[in-house]
Amino acid sequence: MRTLIAVALVLAVPFATAQAPATAPAPAAALPRTASPAGAEAYIISPKDGATVKSPVLVQFGLKGMGVAPAGVKFENTGHHHLLIDTDAPADAAAPLPATDKIVHFGKGQTETTLTTLTPGKHTLQLLLGDQNHVPHNPPVISRKITITVTQ
């Protein structure tokens, strides 16, 4: 009986140490990037670059050459806005944009927002369009960075 158990264990070791097929989702960087059409452009309608504004600040988003669709919805030549506040665009344009206090997602397809948390002083704002998976398009559709001054 001991010999039978020993043989069974020896035969089972290769199966126990073999790697199981990967069932985890692909890493974020492996998501395919969605192409953007030539000439597509994101821009901030309001406030204007260099403006002095009072809090709360209404920010209106503009988009040329593409349409807006909610996150999770795949339509050709569409995406949804992400507002970059006092930060640069992430270096890895192939990964989904994180949701932070500096990268605000508008996954329902919103085209404006009212910012209530900007402290008095200078701030930068920039729009970056993301596809259905929050991944920037290829090439990225990103606005020019603007600077505003918030007063009390």
Image: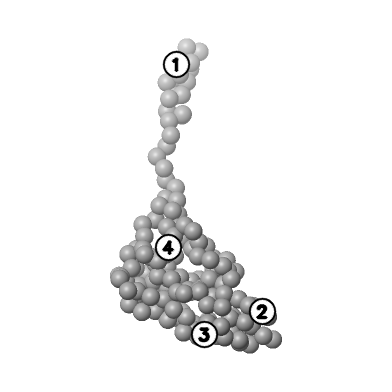
Task: Find residue 48 and name its label.
Answer: 3
Callout 4 touching callout 1 (CB < 8 Å): no
Q: CA distance from mark 4 to mark 1?
A: 52 Å
Query: Which residue type does callout 4 highlight?
Result: Val
Residue at 32%, 64% in the rendered image: 35
Mark toward the viewer: 4 or 3? 3
Mark toward the viewer: 4 or 1? 4
Task: Find residue 7 and name its label.
Answer: 1
Q: Is residue 99 left or right of residue 70?
A: right
Q: Is residue 111 left or right of residue 50?
A: left
Q: CA distance from mark 1 to mark 2?
A: 75 Å
Q: Residues within 10 Å of mark 2 (few under 14, many from 20)?
A: few
Query: Which residue type does callout 2 highlight?
Result: Gly
Between 108 and 32, the residue placed more toward the observer is 32
Q: CA distance from mark 3 to mark 2?
A: 16 Å
Q: CA distance from mark 1 to mark 3?
A: 77 Å
Residue at 56%, 83% in the rendered image: 50
Query: Which residue type does callout 1 highlight?
Result: Val
Residue at 47%, 57% in the rendered image: 92
Query: Which residue type does callout 3 highlight?
Result: Lys
Mark toward the viewer: 1 or 2? 2
Q: Which comes before the other along the chain, label 4 or label 1?
A: 1
Q: Which residue is mark 4?
A: 135
